Image (cartoon, rainbow, N blue to C red):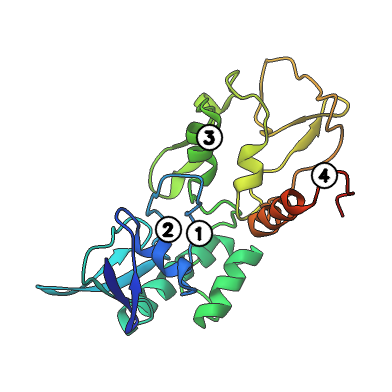
Amino acid sequence: MQITIDGRQVEAKEGRTVLQVARQNGIHIPTLCYHEALQPFGACRLCVVEIETSRGRRLVTSCTHPCSEGLAVHTASDAVLQSRRITVELLMASAEHVPLIQQLANELGVKEPRFTMPENTCVLCGLCVRACNEIVGVGAISVINRGIDKEVSPPFHIASNACIACGTCVLICPTGAITLADINGGAETAHNWDSDFEAVSCQLCGHHSLQPVFADHIKLLAAEEAAVAIPAGEAVP
């Protein structure tokens, strides 16, 4: 199908979202709660775009909105930028010290927030909770409470015995709010909540800390293709 993004006509496959098609065509849309390995969630509202409908224009989250034939999308209209700036201001209210939030603020021209809240590195994007459920399949953590008391936690603030300490939540966290802390003489855990369970030290990773950095899949695929192209018997560079 054909859709139009910022006046540019592009092709879109059935079932693809506006965000996916925009990224495929090098059109930048900021995101915070989106990750390719997870189902779209539409929580952070940074990826909002403006679409044209028979009833006029309206804002939608590009990570969840499906493409349709003839869809017209605007990724940097006044309404879109205003919405994103307000979202970033709200994020800065408690997480202005976070490098990623600072980067988004600079990108959108937000100097300082009009709102203030207690400092908190967690921005409640939900990536860690969703990764624990969708990728690991254990559901050891969840978002609890409501309003300003909302937070990520295991049940009853006690480390869940369902947690396998895989570190997926650490790797996917965009702000570094979840880290691996050393406990009990070198054992590492993905959660520092009080627990009655005996901590078991990983014999492989030791004291190494996982940083929230994702693999460069383009380089990995290129390396794999290069390795396949090398004739048998020759050394892999």
Mark 2 lies on a secondary structure that is loop
- Give the mark, 4 or 1, whose residue is nearer the N terminus: 1
Amino acid type of disc 2? Cys
Q: Nearer the viewer, residue 160 or 6?
A: 6
Nearer the camera: disc 4 or disc 1: 4
What residue appears at the point 50 percent right and 79 percent down from the top-left corner? 108
- Answer few, some or many: residues within 10 Å of disc 3's Cα (few below 14, many 20 plus, some between 14 and 19): few
- Give the mark, 4 or 2, whose residue is nearer the N terminus: 2
C-alpha separation, residue under disc 1 versus residue under disc 3: 18 Å
- Give the mark, 1 or 3, whose residue is nearer the N terminus: 1
Mark 1 lies on a secondary structure that is loop
Residue 160 circle label: none
Residue matched to label 3: 135
- Give the mark, 4 or 3, whose residue is nearer the N terminus: 3
Residue matched to label 4: 232
- Answer few, some or many: residues within 10 Å of disc 4's Cα (few below 14, many 20 plus, some between 14 and 19): few
- Answer few, some or many: residues within 10 Å of disc 1's Cα (few below 14, many 20 plus, some between 14 and 19): many
C-alpha separation, residue under disc 3 versus residue under disc 2: 20 Å
Q: From the viewer's perspective, is residue 171 above or below residue 46?
A: above
C-alpha separation, residue under disc 4 versus residue under disc 2: 49 Å
Amino acid type of disc 3? Ile
Position of 61 with respect to 108 (left or right) is: left
C-alpha separation, residue under disc 4 versus residue under disc 3: 36 Å
Residue 44 circle label: 2
Amino acid type of disc 1? Leu
Rendering coords of residue 208 (x, y %): 84, 40
Residue 100: tell me if it is visible: yes
